[in-house]
Amino acid sequence: MEATQKEKTQTPPEAQKAEYQDCLGCRIVGTVALSGVGLHALNASRAHKPGSPLERRIMGTVGVAFLIGGAVRAIM
């Protein structure tokens, strides 16, 4: 009896593969937010800012990662 209940509650694989589609406004806001954080982090990594070279390098890496995230968000 348990096998038949499990079969009834499982969803077909086609329904599980449905992708979520964001609205245009959500994509724009997400892209601008990620890109803005990336630009802010890149600005914090500039040579004239206080901090050790390692801290500036980390901020530069974080900035580039957020910019890439913003670009991916805009495309997908």
Image: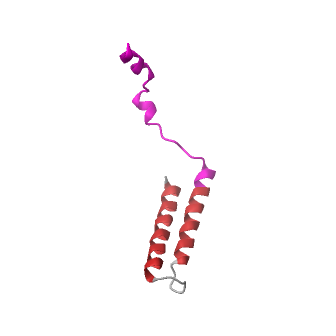
Give the vertical position of 22 relative to 33 (above or below): above
Q: What secondary structure do most residues of the magenta stretch adopt?
A: helix
Name the residue furthest left: 3
At 51% from the left and 82% from the top, the residue drawn is 51
Question: Percent position (x, y) of residue 28?
Answer: 60, 56
In front here: 21 or 65? 65
Q: Give the range drawn in magenta.
A: 1-28
- Quadrant placement of the N terminus: top left
At 46% from the left and 66% from the top, the residue drawn is 65
Labels in figure, total:
0
At 42% from the left and 17% from the top, the residue drawn is 5
**Is residue 61 toward the left or the right of residue 3 in the image?**
right
Question: Percent position (x, y) of residue 73?
Answer: 51, 56
**Is residue 23 toward the left or the right of residue 63 in the image?**
right
Name the residue furthest right: 25
In reply to whether residue 3 is colored magenta, the answer given is yes
Classify residue 39 by image quadrant.
bottom right
- Report the coloring of the rendering: secondary structure
Give the vertical position of 66 relative to 22 (above or below): below
Give the vertical position of 68 relative to 4 (above or below): below
At 45% from the left and 22% from the top, the residue drawn is 9
In front here: 40 or 21? 40
Name the residue furthest top: 1
In reply to whether residue 54 is colored magenta, the answer given is no
Question: Percent position (x, y) of residue 48?
Answer: 54, 87
Question: Percent position (x, y) of residue 20?
Answer: 52, 42
Name the residue furthest bottom: 48
